[in-house]
Image (cartoon, coloured by chain):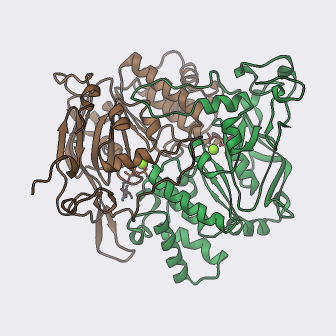
Amino acid sequence: MNKNSQKTSDNKRDPSKSPLLEVSGLKTWFDLKRGIFSRRTDTIRAVDGVSFSIMKNETLGLVGESGCGKTTLGRTLLGLETATAGEVFFCKEPLLKLSRGRMNRMRKSLQVVFQDPLSSLNPRMNIMDIVTEGLVQFKMLEGSREQHARKLLGEVGLDADMIYRFPHEFSGGQRQRINIARAVSMRPDLIICDEAVSALDVSVQAQVINLLLGLQERHHLSYLFISHDLSVVSNIADRIAVMYLGRIVESANAADIIEDPLHPYTKMLIAAIPVAGEKKTARKIIKGETPSLASPSSGCRFYPRCPEAAEICRRRPPPEIRQNGRFICCHLYGGFPE
Amino acid sequence: MSLLSVNNLSVEFAVDEGTLRAVDDVSFYISRGESLGLVGESGCGKSVAALALTRLIPSPPGRIVSGQVFLGDRDLLRLKPDALRAVRGSEISMIFQEPLSALSPLHRIGKQMTEGIGFHKDMSRKEAWQYALSWLKRVGIPDAGQRMYSYPFQLSGGMQQRVMIAMALMLSPGLIIADEPTTALDVTTQAQIFNLIREMKQNETALLLITHDMGVVWEMCERVIVMYASRIVESAKIEEIFSRPVHPYTRGLLEAIPTPARGRNYLKDIPGQVPSPLRYPQGCHFQDRCGYAFERCRNEKPGLVDCGDGHLAACFLAYPGREYK
Ligand SMILES: Nc1ncnc2c1ncn2[C@@H]1O[C@H](COP(=O)(O)OP(=O)(O)OP(=O)(O)O)[C@@H](O)[C@H]1O
Ligand SMILES: Nc1ncnc2c1ncn2[C@@H]1O[C@H](COP(=O)(O)OP(=O)(O)OP(=O)(O)O)[C@@H](O)[C@H]1O
Ligand SMILES: [Mg+2]
Ligand SMILES: [Mg+2]
């Protein structure tokens, strides 16, 4: 492992403090029919053994290929998908084992901004009711419903006069901001942001990210920030985890991931970021079909597409190495035991 | 001759508080095989403009107030409904911004994909199924055979987007209108999709690409249009926009492109808010956020002027007679 990484390794993490969110060995599998009349089913291992933790006032960025299980991971934490295995502790409570009543109360501290902004907004409610619904439920309104709603819309850069309009009357990016306003309204401890700024032009995106950073500074909340865009993630996250086919293959401080990526997949992601204004060279694309989640290989899951793969990578699952505050799951860094 | 030319298109919505003009006097053209980027502030009217081209605006409350959209010598805004339906899909296909709102939740992917094919291409049901399947593979969906039997909710956000992309590309239309097609795609999957689109361009397929990602515009497009608050503020060749942006909004936008950082970092934005479409100011729509605004900007709306070599900008600073750097 690169020696330089020690310098930048995480000093904010205090090992004596317990994390706000602690996930260990989490698995979420789905059964998928082979065909309409088929009795045979395949198991899609959307999340397949994921462990990580998030401290108070910390942001974990989660990146990875489309379909690798990021949304499913977030939904499982929220209790919207049933975990196949694993444990999750949030504020020291076992999140997956809570009764419905306790989970509902927990939802105040655990908010989410969903990936598809339209389908997560009730089409029959106006914007004022949507962004203040939780506040009313938990008796947190400051002033009237209308006053509070206007303030929230202002925070995400929306015209406050829009509060009586309905979700379908907005643009995609405006809907994303309504979702964000609803999530921050509850002053939660943790917000799961799933592609929360992905439909915003760069200047509004910057405003929203600055808002999230400002809220964090003032209220010390934490984010799980899921995004496909590494440059965006690196501007908001303290740490970044890279996921590939249901597993985390590397995690480290944002600076280490960007400047000194170790896993071959992370290296590829960083090399493929298109940069405006730079000479256009054909971007390298990962060769080969996306491997199946139903029948992952017995060795490293990235093996079929890895430019640095060796024989052992095909046969054996890669070791999990923790060093200098970094985590990596790759044979290249674990020596070759044979 | 251009493939598509749009003249003075305006679209309005009737809302409780009054009438808002979501697209105001927009004109542009796309040539055969060309890729045109459309960028601009969230809510500035990009999707509405794109939907209006093939009359997909929900009406009421929406209304195309004026304009012409010529595809060859036919004005799409005046075409009979069945003729228009034939144009959609076979000549122009659309990739919608939010895939879940465009896909039916009740039908399997395979059924939705094959439905349109027989109508536009001469294929049996079985051939159509195989054809759709081959496209699902080309957009990189794993286990494509099984996925034909999945419902949209069983796919990830990026997979839904790729299903939409496959449905648009497989009809080999002359023009693809893609509204934020890659918002959920990681860079490597994105590159794969763009390679497919490039292949189609060799067969003279044109592309109108709406995106917020300036890196994507740079990579995919030959020209770009910048919109702000319902109007076009600048239009130029791609190299021109990046090396010599004229409109102060375009300049701000380019400065706001995020670059990889070492962790939490406040980003540069354009200070202020876009005005509500219900209360656009009398003069330039950008005046309140513009560092250069002067008297004339408050009273008059600037039209597009040529700043040389077809580079158009709607800014009085660029008008002849002013020294502007
Ligand atoms: N059905 C509708 N009823 C009323 N207003 C609408 C409707 N659809 C869109 N609008 C308004 O029209 C304007 C333009 O919306 P449009 O969807 O074109 O924006 P956009 O440029 O695509 O933004 P984004 O990048 O956020 O998707 C917005 O102010 C929006 O609120
Ligand atoms: N309800 C479901 N039933 C069956 N399979 C599902 C379901 N939800 C998700 N999956 C599958 O689980 C895998 C992971 O999906 P997920 O939505 O978590 O991916 P993602 O990383 O969020 O991708 P994207 O970046 O494209 O949004 C995919 O193969 C998807 O098809
Ligand atoms: Mg997702
Ligand atoms: Mg839009």
Residue at 55% across, 73% down: B114
- Residue A255 in view in this figure: yes
Relative placement, left or right, of B36 versus B77 is left
Residue at 38% across, 37% down: A258
In the picture, the quarter occupied by the C terminus of chain B is: top right
Quadrant of residue A312 in the image?
A: bottom left
Give the image location of residue A263, x and y in percent: 29, 47
Chain with brown colouring = A
* Position above or below: B122 against A51: below
Relative placement, left or right, of A5 versus A169 is left
Residue B207 vs residue A44, the one in the foreground: B207
Chain with green colouring = B
> How many dots with numbers?
0
* Position above or below: A59 against B105: above
Give the image location of residue B321, x and y in percent: 90, 25
Relative placement, left or right, of A235 versus B132 is left
In the picture, the quarter occupied by the N terminus of chain B is: bottom right
Residue at 52% across, 33% down: B258
Residue B122 vs residue A97, the one in the foreground: B122
* Position above or below: B181 against A109: below
Quadrant of residue B25 in the image?
A: top right
Relative placement, left or right, of A143 versus B209 is left
Give the image location of residue B291, x and y in percent: 71, 18
**Residue at the left extreme of this rendering:** A338
Residue B161 vs residue B308, the one in the foreground: B308
- Residue A51 in view in this figure: no
Give the image location of residue A143, x and y in percent: 52, 15
Of the four image quadrants, the one with ligand 4 is: top right
